[in-house]
Image (cartoon, rainbow, N blue to C red):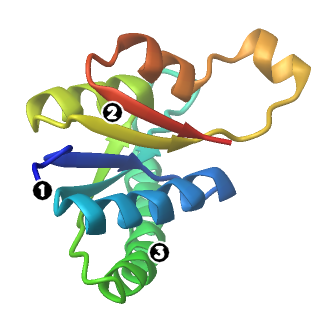
Amino acid sequence: MTETFVHILVPYNGCPGSQKAFKKAVALTQLTKSKLTILTCVEDRTTFGLFKTKTNKEEFEKERKLVTQEHAKLEKYANNYDVLPLFKITQSNMPAQDILEFATKHNVDLIVMGIKNRTRYEKMHYPSTVEDVSKNFQGGILILN
């Protein structure tokens, strides 16, 4: 069997869509024997939109610990299928940009993402990370609903 995918990336934020994407990526990884990376972008919150403070660093550290715990659960699930994913946590202002940069830097050829249901207001006023990634990624993308 020839390798269909060499490196699969799952941007993971804990929502039901990203959980579904993770499980699908584990199944694909098991079939293709590819490398699997889970990337969680913890959004960087600045005070008044301008300053980074000590509190921001403490909040990020708390968030990072929670994400690490969630990653441990994902790793246990993947190990049940003989898949050994890599995990990466980034501090981010723009998750879509960080996802695309990671994918380019690490030769990702498939991104698996889940869509979360958004209200009409959210669709009008807030860009979707999935839309941004799908418009700008040169490799394959699997979007699960």
Residue under the point 38% across and 87% down: 76
Residue with the mark numbered 1: 1
Tell whether 117 sits left or right of 11.
Answer: right
Q: Which mark is residue 70?
A: 3
* 3 or 1: mark nearer the eye: 1
Residue with the mark numbered 2: 99
| Residue type indicated by callout 2 | Ile
| Residue type indicated by callout 1 | Met
Quote the CA–CA distance across marks 2 and 3. Answer: 19 Å
Quote the CA–CA distance across marks 1 and 2. Answer: 29 Å
Which part of the image, by quadrant, shows the N terminus?
A: bottom left
Residue under the point 44% across and 67% down: 67
At mark 1, the secondary structure is loop
Residue 68 at what x, y percent from top left?
37, 73
Q: Which of the 4 image quarters holds residue 137?
A: top left
Quote the CA–CA distance across marks 3 and 1. Answer: 33 Å
Q: Nearer the viewer, residue 60 or 48?
A: 60
Residue 106 at what x, y percent from top left?
10, 38
Name the residue furthest right: 120
Number of residue marks:
3
Res. 19 in view: yes
Circle 1 packing at 10 Å, graded few (<14), some (14-19), many (20+), is: few
